[in-house]
Image (spheres, rainbow, N blue to C red):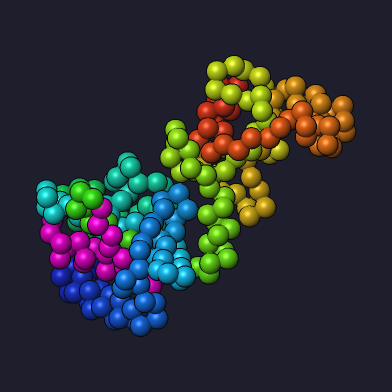
């Protein structure tokens, strides 16, 4: 087991974060910008007038001034896996050096300590800065920014997601007009899928029913006639796998 003095280590991380925050402010002016972070895309966006800045991020955790408690993101069931996976590195580090507060999910804390946790997370993951949005309930959410993303790439990432009335915000999926949530009609896919899987930039979730598969085979592919029969509709990833589970009994 590594032996490290926690107070000294945390203090050093705070000082390093101060330098990073200063460098970040010099390079990116987000002082008066509107902010929006999206767990599904893993992007934090700052916008003002005609300027937009996008950053990849992961969520460290949250501090509640009301209850004076800290919760690590990996302990929060309401935080999506893709933005809390990296935070487990801090938990693993805490286990190696026996820092209990880096391994316990939820406990009494204060704002200064919350900044220490964010600073430690930034150091261990080579982050480029920390942003702390505050929600309507006063909850302070600590995000470590990991990478600046140009607007063209950010648009490509965002365009792969859709707002859904049932599942909020999720990745886009394409299904035939006959797939639904109540009646089994078969479920054919362009490749084997599972919920939450990584997709390449060129791949999408795509599925169609048995009748559409019969037409595709008869037409020797997706020609105009087959596509007219399919009449593709757009759904979110959650809806896609709900349809798959109905038809195949599996996610």
Total number of numbered discs in the rendering: 0
Residue 62, given in percent of the width and then of the height, sits at 24, 54
Q: Position of residue 100 (x, y in %)?
A: 19, 55
* Residue 132 visible within the image: yes
Residue most extreme to the top: 183
Considering the image in quadrants, where does the N terminus appear?
bottom left
- Residue at figure coordinates x 31%, y 68% from the top left: 130
Q: Residue at x 53, y 54 (%)?
A: 158
Considering depth in this image, is 4 or 245 the residue closer to the camera?
Answer: 245
Tell me where residue 197 sits by quadrant: top right
Q: Residue at x 63, y 25 (%)?
A: 179
Q: Establish if 133 lies above or below 22.
A: above
Q: Please state the horizontal and vertical placement of residue 31, each as a whole percent of the image.
A: 31, 73
Q: 163 above or below 87?
A: above
Give the residue at the far front of this rendering.
49
As drawn, is 98 to the left or to the right of 158?
Answer: left
Q: Is residue 52 left or right of residue 220?
A: left
Is there any visible trace of residue 1 in the rendered image? Answer: no
Q: Which residues are magenta?
A: 108-135
Residue 124 is a magenta residue: yes
- Give yes or no for residue 56 being in the magenta stretch: no
Q: Quadrant of the C terminus?
A: top right
């Amino acid at each position: 087991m590594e032996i490290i003095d926690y107070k000294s280590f945390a203090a050093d991380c705070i000082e390093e974060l101060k330098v990073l925050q200063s460098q970040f402010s010099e390079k990116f002016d987000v002082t008066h910008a509107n902010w929006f972070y999206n767990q599904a895309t893993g992007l934090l966006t700052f916008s003002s007038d005609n300027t937009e800045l996008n950053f990849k991020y992961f969520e460290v955790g949250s501090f509640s001034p009301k209850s004076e408690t800290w919760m690590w993101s990996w302990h929060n069931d309401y935080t999506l896996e893709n933005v809390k996976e990296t935070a487990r590195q801090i938990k693993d580090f805490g286990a190696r050096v026996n820092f209990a507060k880096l391994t316990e999910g939820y406990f009494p804390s204060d704002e200064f300590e919350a900044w220490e946790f964010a600073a430690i997370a930034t150091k261990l993951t080579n982050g480029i800065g920390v942003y702390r949005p505050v929600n309507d309930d006063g909850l302070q959410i600590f995000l470590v920014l990991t990478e600046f993303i140009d607007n063209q790439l950010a648009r490509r990432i965002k365009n792969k997601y859709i707002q859904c009335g049932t599942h909020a915000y999720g990745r886009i999926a394409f299904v035939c007009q006959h797939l639904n949530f109540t009646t089994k009609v078969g479920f054919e896919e362009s490749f084997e899928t599972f919920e939450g899987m990584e997709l390449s930039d060129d791949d999408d979730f795509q599925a169609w029913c048995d009748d559409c598969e019969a037409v595709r085979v008869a037409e020797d592919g997706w020609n105009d006639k087959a596509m007219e029969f399919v009449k593709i509709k757009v759904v979110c990833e959650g809806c896609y796998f709900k349809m798959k589970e109905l038809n195949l009994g599996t996610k």
